Image (cartoon, helix red, strand yellow):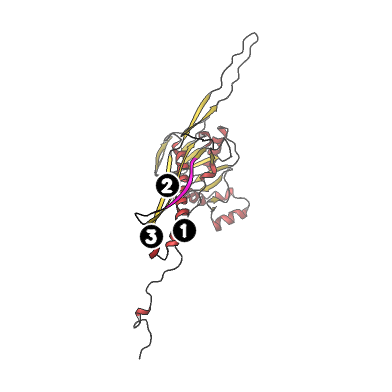
């Protein structure tokens, strides 16, 4: 007589088992907020005005001639809140009673909502940098271009672009402390596969680390190029088609940014939160569900166009 086997006692074998753990999405680093000067003098209203003061000038003095007094140029920078965002989730009472995972789902609401909002903040900061410049234009300041298509074929980023970005910032009198650039991961790929990259890595130990561990750690390059600390980001403006100075990038174009992140008045972006991300929760008796809401109001704007260089590259540089 046969004993217990998989064939004759199938009802005693569970066909599906469920783990206590939940699979969650992998999340990348968010870096943009560290490059923004946050404004805090917003007692009320929607728009803040920041006056700007120009330079004094000199003139030749002639004996027995009156001195001519001139006024310094002035301007006005306006900033306003233009983003009112929320993230909301609900869970029914029946699901809470029936689901083994209900408490895990509820515990994920607030951190996931905050993450969704901060991803929107990251995207917005880089978006206003791109829109703050004139498209299909060199955006020349003090004789130096501040927007161009990358010099490499395809086009891809080359070391010449790093040198040119530094030159543009020097011509614009930007402090050369805390030089940073934020690039698309496709740029990291083109630099990793560049045959001349070893010339920038000294001592030899650094090159050994790069070849065994990759060019970046935690979305930050292990070395800098011409003084620029390099960060990777998945939130840069994508899908750009643009021709600058007779050089074209196609619909696979992405904007990469170079700037000085020196804290204070020279930072390229300004921003403010009218309402910091705030969490609300309530029970809806009519729908018999618990509701969780995170809401925020904020704005960001390019403040120092002279402290921003944009280099357009093509993500098509990475083979399929």
Please name whichever residue, 43 or 3, is drawn nearer the observer in this view of the structure: 43
**Secondary structure under the numbered disc 2 in the rendered image:** strand
Q: Is residue 108 left or right of residue 166?
A: left
> Mark number for residue 86?
2
Callout 3 secondary element? helix
Residue 155, x across and y down, in percent: 44, 44
Stretch in magenta:
273-283
How dense is the environment of label 2, judged by Cα within 10 Å: few (below 14), some, or many (20 and up)? some
Crowding at label 3, few (<14), some or many (≥20) Cα neighbours within 10 Å?
Answer: some
Question: Between marks 1 and 2, how big is the CA–CA gap?
Answer: 18 Å
- State the residue in front, 278 or 272: 278
Left or right for 202, reference 136: right
**N-term-proximal mark, 3 vs 2:** 2
Q: Main secondary structure of the magenta part?
A: strand
212 lies left or right of 121: right
Q: Which residue, given by chain and number where applicable, does mark 1 sit on?
A: 107
Residue 178 or residue 199, whichever sits in front: 178
**Quadrant of residue 24 within the rendered picture:** bottom left
Q: Nearer the viewer, mark 1 or mark 3?
A: 3
Give yes or no for contact between labels 1 and 3 (Cβ–Cβ under 8 Å): no
Total number of numbered discs in the rendering: 3
Q: Quadrant of the N terminus?
A: bottom left
Q: Is residue 48 magenta?
A: no
- Is 134 located above or below residue 124 in the figure? above
- The x and y percentages for residue 32 are 51, 45
Answer whether residue 178 is visible to the viewer in this image: yes
Residue 79 vs 22, above or below: the answer is: above
Residue at the farthest bottom position: 1
Q: Which mark is residue 93?
A: 3
User: Helix or strand or loop: what does disc 1 sit on?
Assistant: helix
């Amino acid at each position: 007589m046969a004993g217990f086997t998989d064939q004759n006692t199938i009802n005693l074998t569970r066909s599906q088992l469920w783990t206590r753990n939940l699979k969650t999405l992998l999340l990348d680093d968010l870096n943009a907020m560290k490059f923004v000067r946050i404004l805090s003098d917003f007692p009320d209203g929607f728009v803040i005005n920041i006056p700007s003061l120009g330079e004094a000038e000199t003139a030749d003095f002639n004996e027995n001639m009156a001195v001519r007094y001139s006024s310094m140029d002035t301007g006005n920078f306006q900033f306003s809140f233009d983003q009112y965002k929320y993230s909301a989730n609900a869970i029914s009472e029946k699901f809470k009673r029936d689901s083994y995972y209900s408490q895990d789902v509820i515990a994920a609401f607030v951190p996931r909502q905050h993450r969704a909002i901060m991803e929107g903040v990251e995207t917005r900061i880089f978006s206003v940098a791109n829109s703050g410049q004139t498209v299909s234009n060199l955006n020349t300041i003090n004789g130096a271009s501040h927007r161009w298509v990358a010099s490499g074929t395809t086009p891809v980023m080359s070391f010449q672009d790093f040198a040119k970005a530094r030159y543009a910032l020097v011509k614009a009198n930007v402090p050369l402390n805390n030089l940073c650039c934020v690039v698309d991961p496709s740029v990291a790929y083109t630099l990793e596969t560049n045959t001349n990259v070893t010339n920038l890595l000294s001592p030899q130990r650094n090159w050994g680390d790069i070849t065994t561990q990759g060019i970046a750690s935690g979305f930050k390059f292990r070395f800098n190029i011409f003084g620029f600390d390099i960060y990777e980001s998945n939130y840069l403006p994508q899908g750009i088609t643009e021709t600058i100075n007779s050089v074209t990038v196609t619909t696979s174009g992405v904007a990469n940014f170079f700037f000085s992140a020196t804290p204070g008045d020279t930072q390229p972006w300004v921003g403010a939160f009218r309402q910091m991300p705030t969490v609300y929760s309530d029970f809806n008796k009519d729908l018999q569900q618990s509701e969780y809401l995170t809401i925020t109001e904020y704005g960001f704007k390019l403040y120092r166009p002279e402290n921003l260089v944009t280099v357009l590259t093509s993500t098509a540089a990475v083979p399929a």
